[in-house]
Amino acid sequence: MSTKPFGSLEPPTVREEKEAKAKDVSEGGTEAGARRRQHRRSNSFIMVKHVRETPDEVVDQSVAPNVNAEWVNMKGAWVIHVVLITLAKLIINEVPGISDAVKWSIVNLGYMLVSYCIFHYVKGAPQDLNSGAYDELTLWEQIDQGYQYTPAKKYLTSLPIAMFLLSTHYSHYNPWLFSLNLAGLLLVLFPKLPILHRLRFLIFPPAPASRSISGTATPVHS
């Protein structure tokens, strides 16, 4: 009498292929089943995409320095943030009819918005000296060749936190202003997390084009 072991001894890849083929047959053919599965995947309103680095891009990045991100480590680059924030605060102070709490919140939210657009929204490099190797990367992902916890990235992470604490203090912990300032802080801190490096969250992504499987071309006799 033969005994049958519990479970399947087939490798996971072989077992998955057999299950996929069985599912295709039950749905009315291989091509039809593939289209149905593709349609189900495209119904998702959000998709996470990982921007991978090809060997050609690695070579292109080493051809020339990335001037688009090198300025972050230049002399005076860190001080300019404080200078611009101070100038913005002095300009806002001249606007009459606004409380000091609202003024600090305006400066803080303005800095957060500009910081998000520069470091996390715009992609690529204006001066393309690397054959488009940075076209899919944000400025934050280009800084220090993508390494995490560098001095520049620590400074650019701590500055929004300091601005949030200042605006919260001078707004006397007003619940509404606190919520707005906290939302601005999360807006710029969330993309800086190392776990989100090279990840893209696509809202309502377009459905991928379906590929039809054609048979052998019919020979044409002249």
Image (spheres, helix red, strand yellow):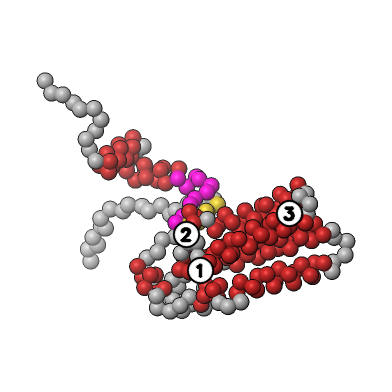
**Residue at 70% across, 63% down:** 110
Type of amino acid at the residue the image marks with label 1: Ile
Residue 83 appears left or right of 57 = right
Whether residue 205 appears in magenta in the rendering, the answer is no
Indicate the amino acid at tag 2.
Answer: Arg
Q: Which residue is mark 1?
A: 143
Q: Which residue is the site of mark 2?
A: 198
Quadrant housing residue 189: bottom right
The kind of secondary structure element at disc 3 is helix
Q: Is residue 72 above or below residue 192?
A: below
Name the residue nearer the viewer: 91 or 11: 91
Marks 2/3: CA distance? 32 Å
Tag 1, which secondary structure? helix
Q: Residues within 10 Å of mark 1 (few under 14, many from 20)?
A: many
Give the camera-side residue of 159 and 70.
Answer: 159
Q: Residue drawn at (45%, 43%), measured in percent from left and top? A: 40
* Residue 167, x across and y down, in percent: 73, 57
Instruction: Write the start and end of the magenta stretch as one range.
Output: 41-50
Name the element at disc 2: loop
Give the camera-side residue of 17 and 201. Answer: 201
Residue at x-position 54% and y-position 51%? 204
Kindly identify the amino acid type of the residue bearing the numbered disc 3. Thr
Whether residues under marks 2 and 1 lie with C-beta atoms below 8 angstroms apart, the answer is: no
Observer-nearest residue: 180 or 161? 161
Would you place residue 29 above or below residue 192 in this image?
Answer: above
Q: Position of residue 122 (x, y in %)?
A: 57, 66
Disc 3 or disc 1, which is closer to the eye?
Answer: 3
